[in-house]
Image: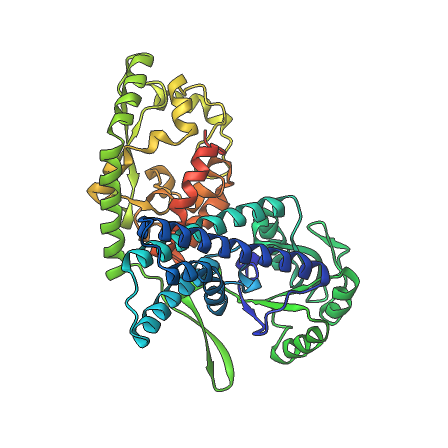
Amino acid sequence: MSGNTAVSGVRRSRARLGSPESAAWTGAYLRRVGVADGACALAASVLAYEVRFDDPGYRPAIYLAFTGLLPLLWVLSVGLAGGYDPRFIGVGSDEFRRMLNGAVSLTAMVAIASYAVKFEVARGYMVIALPCATLFDLVVRHQLRRRLHRMRSRGACMRRVVAVGHAPAVADLIGELRRGTYHGLSVVGACLAGGTMLGEIAGVPVLGGLTNVTTAVGYLGADTVAVLACPEMNGIRLRELAWDLEKTGTDMCVAAALLDVAGPRTTIRPVAGLPLLHVDHPELAGGKQVLKGVFDKAVALSVLILLMPLFAGIMLAIRLGDHGPVFFRQTRVGKGGHTFPVWKFRTMVVDAEQRRAELSALNESDGALFKMRRDPRVTTAGGWLRRYSLDELPQLFNVVLGDMSLVGPRPALPTEAAKYGDHMRRRLVVKPGITGLWQVNGRSDLPWDEAVRLDLRYVENWSLALDLQILWKTWSAVVRGHGAY
């Protein structure tokens, strides 16, 4: 079992806000979100009213009243769709999806109500008001989430967690949550199974075994218990623990014994009175992969056309730098192990490959990659291109040709792929990508095993929605320039 599944398991059906401290910041955050939702709806309705009824002689009062009423209807609709569920604060796409469901529900409600009372709604008004309210709200909620993530990176707005399980799994969970503070979970104590007697684990105090969980929760003021899979915690003991935690309003999460498999692939199905976790196979072929291919090629071709002036400027800067070739061609391993030529803007001196052997002792990577933070072979223009990942832009041609995808695992060198074991070869069942989870989670700063784990997570949990999230986050990662060298 790996703690990397980080509390993405089964919660109790009754959502609570946890301890008083947690309830305070959670309630304040949800009130702020509600006010923001109403403000977005008001701005959209005012905009629609001013644009649709710009004639001073025709300003119907009924639409003026609807303009004032829309914020209330919007907040109510989003609330009914679960858009203020505290379980989804700051993590995942559920918050945004529920807000979109609320928008669709409100649109349907307005259409049904207008038909029922035989009132012909001004389509120009509705076409502006509801889509703009949705767009405004998505942007504002995203900004609120970014602010929350910054606060969590400083240790604020966190839920206090007691981890329960075997020592290796607990240590993995602690490390995962420390790397991803945006999850909003901080392990403050542990109760270990298997009779392990430790004073602390990964800097977190150990407060006993499985029988000491409720005591540890009270002592530490925790509001969440994360139970990692272990044979000792059977159904009866888990049920008894849930009953004890219910008395104090403490949330309980159960992490399934799966490696980075979550989201749409997992479904809880009651069978013979047992809640069985059904795991679907990853969608590595079929209609959705065809849609992904069409989307990739359409976006890549459009971006290539738009960025032609930038391409010309980069080519000129490289050529004037040392009069060498503009492009760098290298063989990479793609889907199914087939090789293909990948294209990049050249960022190193012409004889970089020949000089690599003399620098091998200075390799800063802990895996099959060769990485140096200050590689002397990088040219002046190349350093700038690498910082903002502009050297990767020619790979858009590889996407158009079908060798690569916009999002996927990092394309491996043949020498790297030759060292892959059966576990790592799983990365080759999909096309490599220009960007991926490795790109938005640290780039070259990532340890080798972490980069591999992220690639495998992508393969196991691929979806078009995940691709869109990664593409959105890539922009931020590239602008910051962290981990690029």
Res. 64 in view: yes
Quarter where residue 188 is shown: bottom right
Is residue 448 shown left or right of residue 330?
right
Quarter where residue 127 is shown: bottom left
Of residues 198 and 56, which is closer to you in this image?
A: 56
Of residues 216 and 70, which is closer to you in this image?
A: 70
Q: At x 68% / y 59%, what residue is drawn? A: 24
- The x and y percentages for residue 221 are 75, 61
Res. 338 in view: no
Q: At x 65% / y 54%, what residue is drawn? A: 158
Q: At x 47% / y 81%, what residue is drawn? A: 270
Quarter where residue 248 is shown: bottom right
Instruction: Check the image and report above or below for 413 versus 171.
Output: above
- The x and y percentages for residue 269 are 45, 78
Q: At x 71% / y 70%, what residue is drawn? A: 210
- Residue farthest toward the front in the current orientation of the protein: 57
